[in-house]
Amino acid sequence: MKYRVVRWLFEIATKKMRIFKPEMAPIKVPNRFELTHQPSVGLALESLIRAYQTVFKEASYWAEIWSREAIQEKLEREVDRQSSFLVTMLGDKEMPIAGFAWGEILAPTNLGPRIAKALQKKPAELDGLIDKLLRFRITKLVYADEFAIVARFRSGIEPVRGLLQPWLEWAWLENQVFSCLFWTTPASPIYKLGLYMGFEPVFWTKVEEKDIVFILNRDFRPLLKICQNMNSRQIARILMAVSRRRRRK
């Protein structure tokens, strides 16, 4: 019920808004965010690998150590087609890339092997997730493998908007896909933020005693309208209203 309320609030708030081509949007993506469809190379690759290692080591709820080779193999496996995307956020001299997001447009029936590889599970263990997506009549969705920001660059709405808006625009305007799925741990701030942005938990599992939750946005177009049409202060007000509604429920 509470997730339907959030979707309803977003639909009401954005009813009179349009979705624009990126170059025509009232709120455009700043130049420090870049969308591509190929793995990074050269210095950009090294900076992306360093950002990945930093994010997953510094967060206590992950506390993971990743080798350069493992990250590069993951990138080559997950970002190597026109149906995939990679968005990076520039940082500073010390941390040239400060945030990243990547994933691919997939049919639910193709998710099992991809997720199983990342979580070191058997594809059959994810049948419950696939069945639920099919019951929602989702034929294609954007599966986000990664969405992360180095801790000291997380201030405000803009880093999240900048990493999100480019691939939402690409998925809907170029591919007519409007559903999105990703997984995280409920201890991560992105889980709570996702719930405030119209996502809902649809499947739970465990990896090495760590809780993992998959959250789905069945129709992200209201969220895309918010990204393209509202400034940071307006978005903060909407998220605050959603937070109050969720607490009442």
Image (tube, rainbow, N blue to C red):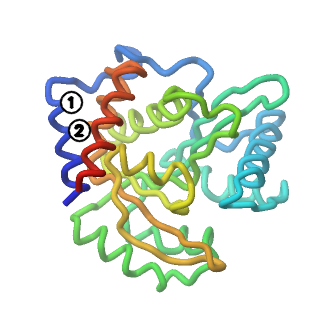
Q: Which residue is drawn at 19% across and 50% down?
A: 5
**For residue 170, which quarter of the picture?**
top left
Left/right of residue 128 with respect to residue 209 in the rendered view: left
Query: Judging from the image, what secondary structure is the residue with disc 2 in?
Result: helix
**What percent of the width, then of the height, locates residue 221?**
28, 39
Q: In front: 151, or 199?
A: 151
Q: Do the residues labelled 1 and 2 touch (CB within 8 Å)?
A: yes
**What percent of the width, then of the height, locates residue 197?**
36, 43
Q: Residue at x 81, y 43 (%)?
A: 50
At label 1, the amino acid type is Thr
**For residue 223, which quarter of the picture?**
top left
Spatial CA distance of label 1 from label 2 is 6 Å
Q: Residue at x 64, y 40 (%)?
A: 149
At label 2, the amino acid type is Phe
Query: Judging from the image, what secondary structure is the residue with disc 1 in?
Result: loop
Labelled disc at residue 14: 1
**For residue 70, which quarter of the picture?**
bottom right
Mark 2, other Cα within 10 Å: few <14 / some 14–19 / many ≥20: many
Labelled disc at residue 10: 2
**What percent of the width, then of the height, locates residue 203?**
40, 72
Left/right of residue 249 with respect to residue 199 in the rendered view: left
Left/right of residue 14 with respect to residue 158 in the rendered view: left
